[in-house]
Image (cartoon, rainbow, N blue to C red):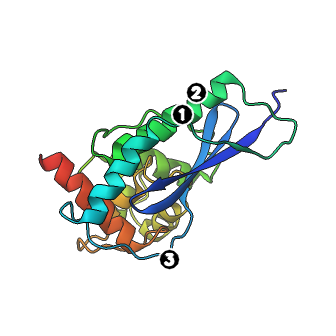
Amino acid sequence: MTEIHCWDFTMNTPLGKLTVTGANAYISGIKHSDPDTKFGNYDESLPSFKSSMNLLKKQLLIDPRLNCVDSNFSVEEEWMTVAISVKNQLVRYFRGELQDFQIPFYDFSGTDLQNDVWSEMLSIPYGHTTSYKKIAEAISRPKSFRPVGGAVGRNPWSIAIPCHRVIGSSGKLVGYASGLSRKSWLLAHEARVFGS
């Protein structure tokens, strides 16, 4: 039986601190640390936006500082390589240089419904949105859009599994665990990159 070692690191993003958790050479979660924090509209002309993009670029050159749950844990090369890859992908995503993540997810260990929803969200193209209702229909549970909404909200891999691309049937931004201002920012960011 393989021993499981857990680790994490926190990185700065234009939307505040993002924590990436891992187990061995897999990513077990990506979450914003402070979901209640409000963020302004996506505006590339602001000095604060330009400053955050410059800070992101510097992070590409710095390996993440891993915190390990197990005090006897030594960072093996494979695990550090995964952490560096994921951090760099997130930096490149926020800089508008990456649209598709290549992340080794730890395990879809939710309920059958949650696993189906998370898998379906992976198929939402960059720069596009879908609704809870359309996801329910796509996973052959057309009347389950409320449970689908619950599964979207419990997505452990924010951004990489793009729950921010799921909106209400009316086109309204609803329900985002990291806060609606972040959801709005991410959608505007992707729309700008996709349109350029």
Q: Residue at x 48, y 67 (%)?
A: 178
In the picture, which quadrant includes the N terminus? Answer: top right
Q: Is residue 104 above or below residue 191?
A: above
Mark 1 residue type: Ile
Q: Are the residues flagged by discs 1 and 2 in contact, CB closer than 8 Å?
A: yes
Mark 3 residue type: Asp
Question: Which is in the foreground here, disc 1 or disc 3?
Answer: 1
Quickly name the residue at label 1: 84
Residue lying farthest right? 72
The secondary structure type at the circle numbered 1 is: helix
Q: Nearer the viewer, residue 86 or 12?
A: 12
State the image coordinates of residue 82 (x, y, percent, origin top left): 57, 31
Task: Give the mark, 3 or 2, whose residue is nearer the N terminus.
Answer: 3
Quickly name the residue at label 2: 81
Q: Residue at x 54, y 57 (%)?
A: 31
Q: Is 67 on the left-hand or right-hand side of 160?
A: right
Quickly name the residue at label 3: 36
Gap between marks 1 and 2, in whole Å? 5 Å
Count of numbered tags: 3
The secondary structure type at the circle numbered 3 is: loop
Gap between marks 3 and 2, in whole Å? 32 Å
